[in-house]
């Protein structure tokens, strides 16, 4: 049986290896933010059929981002942490987004 922690390049068996706690936290935060974007698109799709096809396309794009999220790519993780909170608000249609 494979170790579920070993997916996406995470060290197996809970061993952080050369990862520091900050790296782990950044990866987990980036993962949660991408999931929040996907959920925001799900909410918009469920709210009505207007532009549902376009919303599903965008949602699929972020599902790919999630699937391909590389815990060793600190530049991309930092970009997600910096940019995705605004993206989530924009997808949700929140004022000031």
Image (spheres, rainbow, N blue to C red):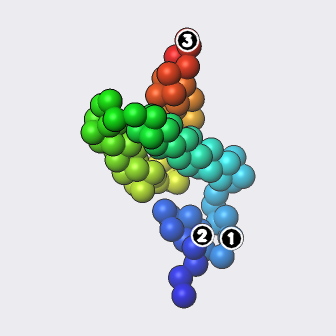
Q: Which residue is mark 3?
A: 96
Q: Going from the N terminus, do you reach mark 2 or mark 3 first?
A: 2
Q: Is residue 22 left or right of residue 60?
A: right
Alpha carbon distance from label 2 to label 3: 38 Å
- The answer to whether the residue labelled 1 contacts the one labelled 2, judged by CB atoms less than 8 Å apart, is yes
Q: Which residue is mark 1?
A: 14
Q: In the image, which is nearer the foreground, mark 2 or mark 3? A: 3
Q: Kindly identify the residue that appears in the image at 54 percent across and 88 percent down.
A: 1
Q: Secondary structure at mark 3?
A: loop
Question: Which of these two is toward me, 2 or 36?
Answer: 36
Image location (x, y in percent) of residue 66: 45, 51
Q: Quadrant of residue 3?
A: bottom right
Q: Is residue 85 left or right of residue 49?
A: right
Q: Which residue is mark 2?
A: 5
Q: Kindly identify the residue that appears in the image at 51 percent across and 68 percent down.
A: 7
Q: Is residue 6 above or below residue 75?
A: below
Q: Secondary structure at mark 1?
A: helix
Alpha carbon distance from label 1 to label 3: 40 Å
Image location (x, y in percent) of residue 20: 69, 53
Q: Kindly identify the residue that appears in the image at 28 percent across and 35 percent down.
A: 54
Can residue 93 be spotted in the picture? yes
Q: In the image, which is nearer the foreground, mark 1 or mark 3? A: 3
Image location (x, y in percent) of residue 17: 64, 66
């Amino acid at each position: 049986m494979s170790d579920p922690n070993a997916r996406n390049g995470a060290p197996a068996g809970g061993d952080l290896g050369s990862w520091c706690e900050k790296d782990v936290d950044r990866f987990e935060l980036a993962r949660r933010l991408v999931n929040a974007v996907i959920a925001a698109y799900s909410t918009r799709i469920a709210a009505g059929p207007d532009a549902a096809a376009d919303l599903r396309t965008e949602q699929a794009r972020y599902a790919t981002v999630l699937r391909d999220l590389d815990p060793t790519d600190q530049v991309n993780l930092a970009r997600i942490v910096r940019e995705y909170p605004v993206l989530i608000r924009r997808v949700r249609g929140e004022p000031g987004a």
